Image (cartoon, rainbow, N blue to C red):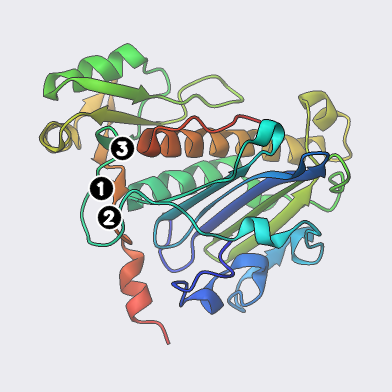
Amino acid sequence: MADAAGFYVRYYVGHQGKFGHEFLEFEFRPDGLLRYANNSNYKNDTMIRKEVHVNPAVLDEVARIITDSDILKEDDANWPMADRVGRQELEIVMGEEHISFSTTKLGSLLQVQQSKDPEGLRIFYYLVQDLKCMVFSLIGAHFKIQPIQR
Amino acid sequence: MAARDADMADLDEHPRRGARSAAARKQKGRGFRDREEMDIDDRSGPYEATERGGTGPLQSVEGWVIFIANVHEEATEEDVHETFAEFGDIKNIYLNLDRRTGFVKGYAMVEYGTKKEAQDAIDAMNGQELLTQKLAVTWCFSRGPGRAASSRATRR
């Protein structure tokens, strides 16, 4: 399912604030390399950067979750723009499709419902949570760290 | 993230930001035009790893983790525990839920203390049913690239 030739996923969420550039980013590369970076400067917290290769079966599961979400049929044209509150980016390469969506941070489902594209944004909103949840478990299981949930 | 890694020899193949995306691919989204103005330096390495190089399963910090796919959406942690405890003492179970529906997302991770316990669980449970669904059980982490290694070799 996760065609080895091209499957790629990257998610970023972050903002510039009084604690500097705080962000979370992860990516799954075609060869199975999972990379995770998390920088929170609050209370002098430091940058965490971890990487580990996951089995092809894990990439297949990521691909399944993405396919089932139907995110590739969506478009970010009517989503709220990234702004001072923050920025999210979701980039996926899968088969013939390559999406690179960006929007602001979404604080709540209400914000999703009140947007110009609630259906599309809802798909993004839940997919991002499902992917984050999976990455936190993978990184947590392998490195025994508790990634910051945001 | 990748921009400054010396080991990313395949950078020009890398799809990041669509710079050299395969021409045949359909591109969609503002991310291709609307690049982040935030400090890109923060987003490059170095990245820590437990071990690098080689092939085969990779040991995690506190044990050996297996990955289980096609888990029934109504499976419980007890179901998973009951099924996998017979191969050894389970250190941890991850059974994540679909954030929208609240049902099991479809995968689980189980951690054992020893490689043998994990291997026994994979050998015995891969292809076996749990709540009518056939499980796919394998290692979660590996020491090096998976199947993409072959495509890397044939590049250019």
Q: Chain of mark 2?
A: B
Q: Identify the amino acid type marked 3.
A: Val
Q: Residue furthest bottom?
A: B156
Crowding at dot 1, Cα within 10 Å, few <14 / some 14-19 / many 20+, comes out as many
Residue at point 22%, 59% (across, down): B55
* SS class, disc 3: loop
Instruction: Indicate the quadrant where residue B36 lies.
Output: bottom right
Please report contact status of discs 1 and 2: CB closer than 8 Å, yes or no: yes
* SS class, disc 1: loop
Location of mark 2 (residue) = B143
Crowding at dot 3, Cα within 10 Å, few <14 / some 14-19 / many 20+, comes out as some
Residue situated in front as seen by the camera: A8 or A33: A33
Label 2 to label 3: alpha-carbon separation: 13 Å
State whether residue A63 is above or below residue B31. above
Residue at point 31%, 63% (across, down): B147
Please tell me how many numbered marks the rendered image carries. Answer: 3
Location of mark 1 (residue) = B58
Q: Viewer-nearest of labels 1 and 3?
A: 3
Label 1 to label 2: alpha-carbon separation: 5 Å
Location of mark 3 (residue) = B61
Q: Viewer-nearest of labels 2 and 3?
A: 3
User: Is the C terminus of chain B in the top left, top right, bottom left or bottom right quadrant?
Assistant: bottom left
Q: In screen coordinates, is B44 left or right of A87?
A: left
Q: Earlier in the sequence, mark 2 or mark 3?
A: 3
Q: Identify the amino acid type marked 1.
A: Leu
Q: Position of residue B44 (x, y in %)?
A: 59, 61
Q: In screen coordinates, is B128 left or right of A111?
A: left
State whether residue A36 is above or below residue B102. below
State whether residue B58 is above or below residue B21. above
Q: Identify the amino acid type marked 2.
A: Arg
Instruction: Indicate the quadrant where residue B19 lies.
Output: bottom right
